[in-house]
Image (cartoon, rainbow, N blue to C red):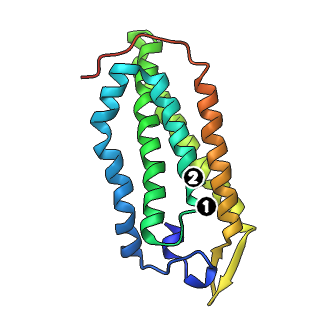
Amino acid sequence: MQQLQAPTETGYGLGLSVTEAGLWMVPSGLAMVVLSPVNGYLLNRIGGKVVLIAGTVIIAIGYIVRNFLYHSALEVSLSAALVGIGTAFAYAAMPALIMSAVPLAQTASANGLNTVLRQVGTSTSSAVVAAVLSVSFVVIDGGSYPTWSGIVVLDVVAAAVALIAGAIALAIPRHRVLDLS
């Protein structure tokens, strides 16, 4: 979203309004919604482990692609949609993996912990983004904007974290496939 709204003087920004930028981000959200039935099907057919790993790889690809596709709103929207698709896969897989790994009586508390850890991860991610961008910015017309190098660092870190998550997911033992239909 910052790439869409940043002024063109940054060298990467497209100078769009908040409304225009928001509309260009709609496909990313729609991709997540449209993939819900696909995720359910995949979880039933191949299990949460494979879906989670696929999601982390798609997220990593999306973040790497962002470093090359930033010249138009369509390119930014497509790379954001890739990250959204990967996120949809990963977020759908986690509860299924949890439910297949814990006793039935503990699924609610285990999924509650998953929700808390998602919030911790989101908060930590926001703090890392703020820290990186606070030391890598440029001032244009009185406004502070991230430098392109700061954005690239964040994209590479996000891709690396996604791949690390996928590598960790390889260690998940095989459990029963849940029928989520």
Which percent across, then down, holds residue 103? 43, 9
Q: Are discs 2 and 1 less than 8 Å apart at CB?
A: yes
CA gap, disc 2 and disc 1 = 7 Å
Mark 1 surroundings within 10 Å by alpha-carbon count, few (fewer than 14), some (14 through 19), many (20 or more):
some
Q: Three-letter amino acid code at disc 2?
A: Tyr
Query: Can residue 109 be seen here?
Result: no
Query: Can residue 177 be seen here?
Result: yes
Q: Secondary structure at mark 2?
A: helix
In this view of the protein, which residue sits in the foreground, 75 or 91? 75
In the rendered view of the protein, which quadrant contains the C terminus? top left
Q: Is 146 displayed left or right of 15 in the figure?
A: right
Q: Residue at x 46, y 42 (%)?
A: 87
Q: Residue at x 50, y 28 (%)?
A: 113
Report which residue position mark 2 lands on: 63
Q: Is 17 displayed left or right of 124 in the figure?
A: left
Please count the marks in the image: 2
Q: Residue at x 53, y 50 (%)?
A: 62
Circle on res. 77: none
Q: Three-letter amino acid code at disc 1?
A: Asn
- Say if 98 sits above or below 175 in the image: below
In this view of the protein, which residue sits in the foreground, 122 or 163? 163
Report which residue position mark 1 lands on: 67
Which percent across, then down, holds residue 149? 71, 66
Q: Secondary structure at mark 1?
A: loop
Mark 2 surroundings within 10 Å by alpha-carbon count, few (fewer than 14), some (14 through 19), many (20 or more):
many
- Say if 65 sits above or below 173 in the image: below
